[in-house]
Amino acid sequence: MAQMNISVPDALKQWAEKRVAAGSYANTSEYLRDLMRRDRDAASELEWLQAEIDKGIASGIDPRPVEQIFADLKAKHLPTHD
């Protein structure tokens, strides 16, 4: 495993140590690794969301009225009760 040395303000160091003392993490390294993983996952989700937004924008404007779009979606995705 690679090592990193970081400098943080005293207040952040104390915060990390509080998290460890509360029993949420075994040590500050574990806490920081968890924060970094969460940040990585959030960035990945944001990239996916932006790509979906870009696809939507590129697809153009649907000429149907909004009510018709929702009705079509309901008909396609909701089960029918025969």
Image (spheres, rainbow, N blue to C red):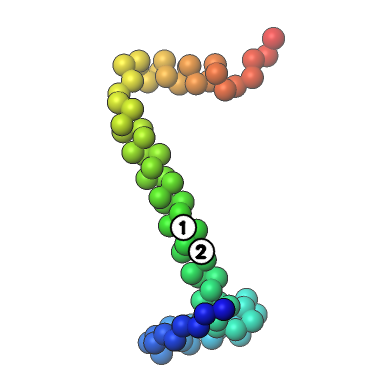
Q: Mark 1 falls on what kind of element?
A: helix
Judging by the rendered image, the residue that carries numbered circle 1 is 42
x, y (%) of residue 38? Answer: 51, 64
* Above or below, comparing residue 56 to residue 39 in the picture: above
**Which kind of residue does numbered mark 1 sit on?**
Ala
Residue 48 lies, with reference to residue 20, above or below; the image says: above
Q: How many marks on residues?
A: 2
Residue at the far front in the pictured view: 1
The residue furthest right is: 82
State which quadrant residue 5 falls in: bottom left
Q: Residue furthest bottom?
A: 10
Instruction: State left or right for residue 78 relative to residue 82.
Output: left
Quadrant position of the C terminus in the picture: top right
CB-based contact (under 8 Å), mark 2 and mark 1: yes
Secondary structure under the numbered disc 2 in the rendered image: helix
Residue 68, percent across and down? 41, 15
* Mark 2 lies on residue: 38
Residue at 36% of width from left, 35% of height from top? 55
**Can residue 44 be seen?**
yes
In the rendering, at what x and y percent does residue 62 appear? Answer: 33, 20
